[in-house]
Every structure is written in C-alpha cells, then in structure tokens.
Amino acid sequence: MQIDPALLHDMHEQPQPRSTDALIAQLAARQHGVVGRRQLEALGLGRGAIDWRIRQGRLHRVLRGVYAVGHRALTQHGRWMAAVLAAGPDAVLSHHSAGALWGIRPTSRTRIDITTPRTLHATRTLHPHCAVLRHDERTTHQGIPVTTPARTLLDLAAALDRRRLERAITEAERLHRTSPTTIQDLGHDHRGTTNLKTLLLNARSTTRSELRPSSSPSSTRMASRNPRRTSSSREPKSTPPGASTDSSSSSTATPTTAPETRSKRTGGETGS
C-alpha cells in the first residue's frame, strides 16, 4: 500500500524523544520561560522539529528567533531575557533596563535597552546600543546577562540629570550593588558625562569592589555609621614641657572632615 506523501512529511516532522522536550523545559526554566532558536538547534532540533512545536503550541514566538515555552505569559524578567537572546551572542541588558533589573532605578520604558558589539536596528521592542564591553563590565544577575552596576550607572549618566543620577547611585549603595571595578575606573577609560564627573569629584570609594562615587546623602549617612578617625576626633596627646603647640607641627597630615560631615548632616539630606 502506498503511503500518502503528506503523511510521510508529517512523520519526518514528528518531535524527537520526550527527553528533548524535557531539556527544552529545563532550559526555559533557567531563562525565565524563553529559549532561543540557536539554543534549540544546539539541542539537536532541526527546522522541521522546531516548526512542528510551533504549530502544536509548544513554542510561542516572542521575538525573532526567541520563543516562550508552553505559554505566552511572560514576566518582565522573561521579556528582558528574550531581548538579550534576540540580540545575539555577547548581548547584555543595559542602560535603563539594567538599572531596573539591579533595582537601582525603575523604568516605565516599553523598549528594552541592550548593548551588543554588533550594530542592530531599533525596533518597537529593542533599543540597541553598540559597544564592546570589557569582561569586568558585564555579569549575570538573576540568570540574565547584564552590565555591572558600575557600568550601568556610567551608561545612565548620559541620560539622567544630576539629581536622578545621584538617587540611582544612592540606591545602588543602599542595596550594596558591587562591581569588579569602581565607577572611577570606568570613568577614566570611557567618555564620561558632566553629571557623573561632578559626582566623582568627592568620591569616597577606596577599594575596587565598592560603589561610593560621591559625597551623596547616602555617603554622609554611611560616614556617620562608620566614622573615619581624623585629627579632630583623636584624643589630645600630652605635650612635653617646652614643646611647641603650633597646629602646623601636628604629626598627622589628614585634614579634619568633621565640619563638612556636620554640614552635610544638617543640609545635605533634605533633597529627595
């Protein structure tokens, strides 16, 4: 008996063993419910097997080359992950979207910011930025490739005024968002903005893992919780008979910072 050619076509497009679908489900669970076509091909699925799953409602197209697994309902994290997958290899979430993921600045923007070394055209969903990031400017947070907090703040500095930028820095500090490099390190290597440079003038960062780029209200509060020892806060030492009491002969060269700290406590925390 001759087999209908249409039936043969359908047989060739039947899914591979159930273990493949289990792998797809596991991958989607790690990526907030989405998978990329390249990832499916890496699992051994051909074009026919992918298309068959689309027709069966197992895969739902979200963006070009990106699919939601099992259903179309995605969280914000799922949409962010889909944007990164759609932008291709080496793409990361960045700018306003990265600020929202880190929790340092919310955003109501509908387009998702991504940074990639390739030049991409903007769409209704994606707002691409072309840049080659260093390894210490990118990381993964909650399973999503993203710019580090320091790099995120540097990118936001080009779009925010000083007040909003300082709020973002304060929130990053409050949440202890750390980076392999400080904002100062990145600022020397990249073209900065006036707002960021101004905030960096009184930087308090002392290690490569801290985010304390300015004498912001948050920095003042941190100073009050962990005060530095200064010449004005040390216990006075007894002066030997005949020794000079001139302040210029003091053994320490560290200038007192107490008056500045007091002035910031009284007037620097009124802004919001």
Image (spheres, rainbow, N blue to C red):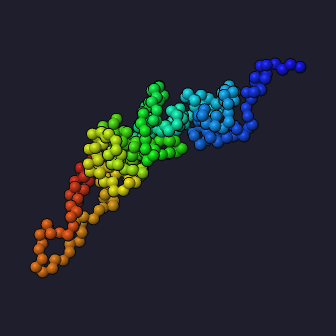
Residue 75, picture quadrant: top right
Q: Residue at x 39, y 46 (%)?
A: 150
Q: Is residue 106 visible?
A: no
Question: Which residue sits at x=54%, y=44%?
Answer: 143
| Residue at the extreme right | 1
Looking at the image, residue 120 lies above or below residue 196: above
Residue 58 appears at what percent x and percent y?
A: 67, 31
Q: Is residue 50 left or right of residue 75?
A: right
Question: Going by the picture, which residue comes out furthest to the bottom?
Answer: 241
Kindly tell me whether residue 45 is visible in this rendering: yes
- Between 11 and 83, the residue placed more toward the observer is 11
User: Residue 95 appears at what percent x and percent y?
Assistant: 41, 37
Residue 11: percent from left, percent from top: 77, 26
Residue lying at 20% horizontally and 58% vertically, measured from the top left: 259
250 vs 209: above or below: below
The quarter of the image holding the C terminus is: top left
Describe residue 170's horizontal placement relative to residue 252 as left or right: right
